Image (spheres, helix red, strand yellow):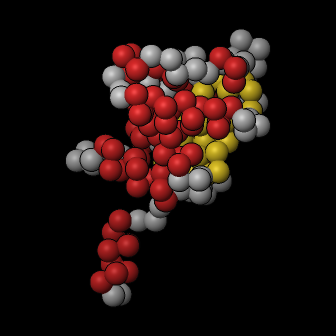
Amino acid sequence: MGLHAKIWHNVGPACDVFINHRTVDTRRTVVRLLYDHLIQQRCKPFLDAETMKPGDRLLDTIDKAIRGCKLGVAVFSPRYCDSYFCLRELSLLVESKKRILPIFYDVKPSQLRVEDSAILSCSQKDLKRFNLAIEEAKSIVGLPFDSSKEKLSD
């Protein structure tokens, strides 16, 4: 095995699917089921809490996973747009021209808005990037999910 192959073998292949979500809204529900289902289908999903290891550099690891993925699944939820990290990841998916599958979990596309840079502690430039990414994602046909009416197992 050559040096390049050894390095690749140690680093491992890129993920197939990057799961972008707001942890407080979705980790114990739809995201966990999605991750487990993708594993069963022999995909290589990236889910921060499952994929990252102690010592990993947070933003570097996430950025590398996004750049290497084939598909981004954006799980939009009621507090999604309050998260700098969710919006940053979505912006990178859009800017990298990745295919995105939106899941609208207890939220309608029309409810997704990025309004206040102070809440996000971001620059006006980032705010513009985030709004462009949200508008792009809203224009993609996604999967709606209303937890008050539907079962996760379905």
Answer with the quarter of the image where residue 113 lies.
top right
In the picture, which quadrant includes the C terminus? top right
The residue that appears at 71% across and 12% down in the rendered structure is: 148
| Outermost residue, bottom side | 2
3 over 62 or under it: above or below: below
The residue that appears at 22% across and 47% down in the rendered structure is: 55
> Where residue 105 sits: x, y (%)?
65, 23
Viewer-proximal residue among 116 and 58: 116
101 over 82 or under it: above or below: below
Q: Is residue 32 left or right of residue 118?
A: right
Viewer-proximal residue among 58 and 114: 114
> Where residue 116 sits: x, y (%)?
45, 16
| Outermost residue, top side | 148
- Number of numbered discs: 0
112 over 74 or under it: above or below: above
> Where residue 100 sits: x, y (%)?
64, 45
In the picture, which quadrant includes the N terminus? bottom left
> Where residue 145 sits: x, y (%)?
72, 24
Residue 40 appears in the figure = no
Answer with the quarter of the image where residue 150 lies.
top right
Q: Is residue 139 left or right of residue 117?
A: right
Residue 42 appears in the figure = yes
Q: Is residue 87 left or right of residue 33?
A: left
The residue that appears at 41% across and 65% down in the rendered structure is: 12
The residue that appears at 36% across and 29% down in the rendered structure is: 123
